Amino acid sequence: MTKLMANVELVIFDCDGVLVDSESIINRVFADTLTECGFPITYAEVTRLFVGKSVATSIEILQQIYGKPIPSNLLDLNRERGIVAMKQELKAIAGITEILQALTLPKCVASNSSPRHIRLALELTGLLDYFDGKLYSCHHVDRPKPFPDVYLYAASQMGYAPENCLVIEDSVTGVQAGYAAGMTVLGYAPSHSDSSHREDLIAAGAKLVFEDMRQLPSFWESQNLTGFGF
């Protein structure tokens, strides 16, 4: 494997789809709520249009599609339903707990989700303590992903230069953000992902794409990096 990095000092994880298997839950609830409230849309359309995007960006897209504003009570209803569904169904991404246990480098989360959502998702899956409160949201910056703001903010708050940061992302939007921040980005695409998604992640700036979190130590070894306790 071609060497991709000279040094890694900080690992930055996206949240939804990287740490927690939440996107199918979120997308299903959003599609159902929109449809019930007079904005008919399918699960597949929600997945295609909104994965990796902030709520604000998603609302802008919806308003363009339907030509009318999305009522605020719809968002409140969707949020309440999403919390109920997450409490019943949410699980950590397979293998991520072992990776977080073994990773000795500093790490943090940078997400387009709200601070409340990030914390709840990590609490429900038992992952919160691995990050020691180092949770960064697009709500902390002016612009969400695909702009680099939240990644640059996370690196600054953690005290590391962008070029020494490694980002783990599963969405094109997130990869674009990490790449724009000047960081090395690895794309995560589970084996059930469409093959075109892997290609899209590479086109967006991912240096490589992997399908199982347990492959990360092999990547580390191939790069002669330190930071895993395996």
Image (tube, rainbow, N blue to C red):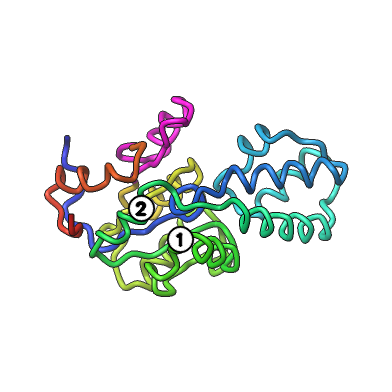
Percent coordinates x, y for residue 84 in the rendering: 69, 58
Residue 208 in magenta stretch: yes
Task: Give the residues in magenta.
Answer: 186-209
**Image side of residue 139 versus residue 85, left or right:** left
The picture quadrant where one finds residue 139 is: bottom right
Residue, far left: 224
Image height of 187 relative to 167, above or below: above
Q: Nearer the viewer, residue 15 or 8?
A: 15
Q: Which residue does the image show at 76% across and 42% down from the upper left?
A: 32
Q: Nearer the viewer, residue 169 or 130?
A: 130
Q: How many marks?
A: 2
Q: In the rendered image, which residue does mark 2 sit on?
A: 167
Q: Which residue does the image show at 81% across and 40% down from the upper left?
A: 35
**Image side of residue 49 versus residue 165, left or right:** right
Residue, far top: 195
Q: Around disc 2, counting alpha carbons within 10 Å, would you say few (fewer than 14), some (14 to 19), or many (20 or more)?
A: many
Percent coordinates x, y for residue 55 in the rendering: 66, 54
Q: Nearer the viewer, residue 211 or 8?
A: 211
Q: Quadrant of the C terminus?
A: bottom left
Residue 56 visible in rendering: no
Residue 230 visible in rendering: yes
Q: Which residue does the image show at 59% across and 49% down from the upper left?
A: 53
CB atoms at circles 1 and 2 under 8 Å apart?
Answer: yes
Q: In the rendered image, which residue does mark 1 sit on?
A: 110
* Separation of marks 1 and 2 at Cα, in angstroms: 9 Å
